Image (cartoon, helix red, strand yellow):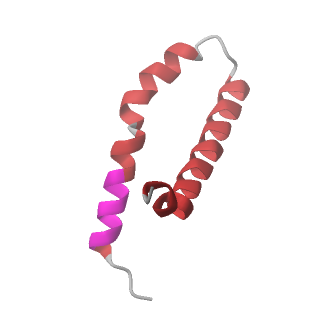
Amino acid sequence: MNIDFEFFALCFSSLFALVNPVGIVPIFISITEEYSTKEKNKIILNSIVFSFFVLLSFSLIGDLIFSF
């Protein structure tokens, strides 16, 4: 298995900058301060799943969308 580390680093850094977890944490904490830990975990899981499917759909049909 040949893994191109340079390409992986480029993809990871691009996604990290796009998602910006460092900037989202204070907003998430302030919005969910009245929720229980169980509710916060459910919100986190829903956010991760939704983000995954958005990124997956754009990676699959992105060329079609931007070709117009």
Residue at image x 42%, y 41%? 19
34, above or below 25, in the image = above
Per the picture, the main secondary structure of the magenta-coloured stretch is helix
Q: Is residue 31 left or right of residue 10?
A: right
Front residue of 57/20: it is 57
Q: Residue furthest top?
A: 34
Residue 51, horizontal then vertical, whole percent: 57, 44
Residue 11, horizontal then vertical, whole percent: 36, 61
Residue at image x 31%, y 63%? 9
Residue at image x 43%, y 55%? 66
Residue span colored magenta = 6-14
Q: Is residue 7 magenta?
A: yes
Residue at image x 70%, y 19%? 36
Residue 63, horizontal then vertical, whole percent: 46, 63
Residue 62, horizontal then vertical, whole percent: 49, 58
Q: Residue furthest left?
A: 6
Q: Residue furthest front?
A: 68
Q: Is residue 63 magenta?
A: no
